[in-house]
Image: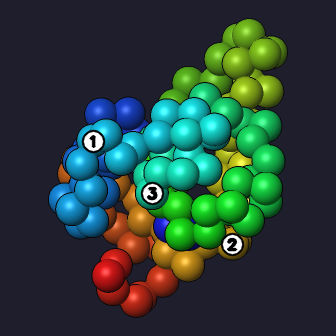
Amino acid sequence: MILIIGGAGQGKLDYVLQKTGYAPDQVAHTPEEARSKPVFDGLEQWPHLDEGALLSVNPDLILICDEVGCGVVPIDPAQRAWREDVGRLCCRLAQRAERVERIFCGLPMILKGDKPWN
C-alpha cells in the first residue's frame, strides 16, 4: 500500500496518475469502490474507515488523503474531532505503508520507502 498526503489542491491525484499511468476512471471515491480499484482519493472523508478490512481485500491500494491538521484549529468540536480522527487514521496507515509521500506544490517528498513505484 502507498499513502499519498498533502494539502488540498497540491496535485496529489495528478501525481499518482502520472506515476502509475492509471486513468481517472480507475480512481475510487468511496471505500466500497476502493475494494476493486487501484487508487482511493478522498480518504479524509472516511476517518472511521476499517483500513484492515479494506487492505485485506486490496493490499496494493494507493491511498490519497488531504492533510487536514495544519492551519487554524476549528472552533467547532466536531470539526476538531474529525481532524484528529483523520490524523490518527493517517498515522496507522503510514505505519503499514510500503511508501509514504507528501505532495506540496506538485512536488513529491518521500517520507518512507525507497523502492521504485513499479
Extreme residue toward the top, this view: 76
Q: Residues within 10 Å of mark 2 (few under 14, many from 20)?
A: some
Tell me the kind of residue under disc 1: Pro
Circles 2, 1 touching at the beta carbon (< 8 Å)? no
Circle on res. 96: 2
Q: Which residue is mark 3?
A: 38
Q: For the residues carrying marks 2 and 3, which lies nearer the camera in this image?
A: 3
Residue sitting at 69 percent across and 61 percent down? 57
Please state, as top left, top right, bottom left or bottom right, where the C terminus lies in the image: bottom left
Please state, as top left, top right, bottom left or bottom right, where the N terminus lies in the image: bottom right
Q: Earlier in the sequence, mark 2 or mark 3?
A: 3
Counting from the top left corner in percent of width and height, residue 4 is at 45, 57
Label 1 residue SS: helix
Counting from the top left corner in percent of width and height, residue 35 is at 61, 50
Circle on res. 24: 1
In-front residue for pair 72/99: 99
Tally of numbered discs: 3
- Marks 3 and 1, how far apart at CA: 11 Å
**Left or right, residue 106 beside residue 104:** left
Q: Is residue 116 above or below residue 8?
A: below
Q: Is residue 68 above or below residue 11?
A: above
